[in-house]
Amino acid sequence: MNETVQTLLVALRGAVGPAGLLLDPADTAPFAEDWRRLYRGQTPAVVRPASTAELAEVVRLCAAAGVGVVPQGGNTSMVGGAVPAEDGSDIVVSLSRMNRVRSVDPLDLSITVEAGVTLKAAQDAAAAAGCLLPLSISAEGTAQIGGVLSTNAGGNNTVRYGNARDLILGLEVVLADGTVFEGLRRLRKDNTGYCLRQLFAGAEGTLGIISAAVLKLAPRAVETEVALCAVPTVAAALALFTRLHREDPASVQAFEYMAGTGMALVLRHIPGAAMPIAAPSPHYALVELATPRRNAGLRAMLEAALEAAMEAGEVTDAVIAESGAQRAALWKLREEHAEAQKREGANVKNDISVPVSKVPEMIARATAACEALIPGVRVVPFGHMGDGNIHFNLEQPVGMDPAAFLARDHDIMDAVGEVVRDLDGSFSAEHGIGKLKPYMMPLWRGGAELEAMRRIKRALDPHGMFNRGKVLPADGGV
Ligand code: 2HG
Ligand code: ZN
């Protein structure tokens, strides 16, 4: 460790106190590896400020020392978005001690939270005040608000409420020189120049560090129905979605697709996962309908729609949850897909989106492309069909060396990407770019778009200290 870093660590200890600084490699190691275990970096320290003032001082000290900063929330990125560099040149700044819910306002329908509050804790605080925080992702128990907003997380409710950025009313952000952008406003209308808060949403911590946010809430549902449906084809799942959406778009809270291959992995690897439908199906759809309207008759609507869907051959079997516990059990079958795939072995993820109408064609064509590329590869698509975002994931062929399979990740991502481009889709629908996908930016976002992003980066982070190597591909500059 060089002298500059040693001096910096002493100053950081002064800024955050001994409880805010982790130096022992045994303590810092979990912060240096991503959830998927694709990347293992190194860091001389994990700094854990307890307030915005402390965070600002940490950033100021790191800027003065010319040391890189990697902001980190729950470290659940699927694209290595929060790992420090391999050479140990980045300090990790963990937001986990900034975990206060500052206020919930059921009249304004807003919640003010610090960056280190987990999404689940924010949802619970909203629910305790009779409101709904309409953002739900599989990692919500661990993912923190700062990371969720920085990555513009999508998740299960996008079909009804949009992505994380759509919920942001106000943001507080620590900038690269340690000054604080104090934008914690909670106005529904505020048309005053550039919308800075939206720059930081989806920037993945490359422009500044989100320290707190004001988020929109919705009225809490009084009727909720969840059904798991066995469907014969992907096209049938889409037909079911269209049927329900036409019936009452405002009540379709989630519409998730799962291939039978993925469901089998969940049932094999996840303790307590149980399939309530007797005969295995090649495809499944999970539907959640919810409404804050009293006596809306959602149950009757769902039953009638499923009956009609069965007559039309769109659904072969279905169960409707009868209790909160059953709803949770059905959701578990969907939410444990990522964990089950991890336990099965090596996997390559394609977090892609296409226009909703193109989902069946995308799955068919990408399946054919991958099977031609790697014979025996296991195709395990699932995801948020209602908004066109499918996790077109692949498990290694049985018996193939995991490292050899992972070495093909770019080939696979490029083959899937070709199909997705042809269908006017995106190569990263909700997981962002992180460390995994900057190489894809020139092809997908090149020219004026990428150049404008670079200019914004230079303007807000002129020395390139924030989350180096993420989002933007190297260009010799920052
Ligand atoms: C989900 O929808 C997450 O469960 C993870 O976005 C997706 O594992 C994945 O590819
Ligand atoms: Zn997802």
Image (tube, rainbow, N blue to C red):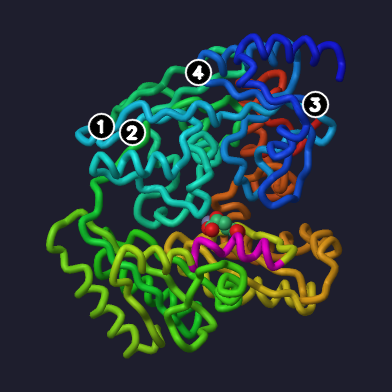
Query: Residue 274 placed where, x, y %?
Result: 48, 75
Of pointers 3 and 2, the one earlier in the residue sequence: 3
Q: Nearer the viewer, residue 458 or 342?
A: 342
Q: Is residue 383 magenta?
A: no
- Kindly identify which numbered label has been placed on residue 52: 4
- Kindly identify which numbered label has been placed on residue 89: 3
Q: Few, some or many C-alpha atoms within 10 Å of disc 2 (few <14, some 14-19, many ≥20)? A: many
Of pointers 4 and 1, the one earlier in the residue sequence: 4
Looking at the rendered structure, the kind of residue marked 4 is Thr
- Provide the residue designation for mark 2: 111
Q: Which residues are magenta?
A: 333-344
Position of the N terminus by quadrant: top right
Disc 1, ligand 2: is the CB inside 8 Å? Answer: no
Q: CA gap, disc 3 to disc 1?
A: 42 Å
Disc 4, ligand 1: is the CB inside 8 Å? Answer: no
Query: Residue 282 placed where, x, y %?
Result: 54, 83
Looking at the rendered structure, the kind of residue marked 2 is Ile
Q: Nearer the viewer, residue 285 or 370?
A: 285
Check disc 2 and report its element: helix, strand or loop.
strand
Residue at the location (39% across, 63% down)?
328
Q: Nearer the viewer, residue 470 or 139?
A: 139
Q: Few, some or many C-alpha atoms within 10 Å of disc 3 (few <14, some 14-19, many ≥20)? A: some
Task: Tell me, yes or no, whether the two marked residues, 1 and 2, touch with CB atoms within 8 Å.
Answer: yes
Above or below: residue 340 compared with residue 102: below
Task: Tell me, yes or no, whether the two marked residues, 4 and 1, touch with CB atoms within 8 Å.
Answer: no
Disc 2, ligand 2: is the CB inside 8 Å? Answer: no
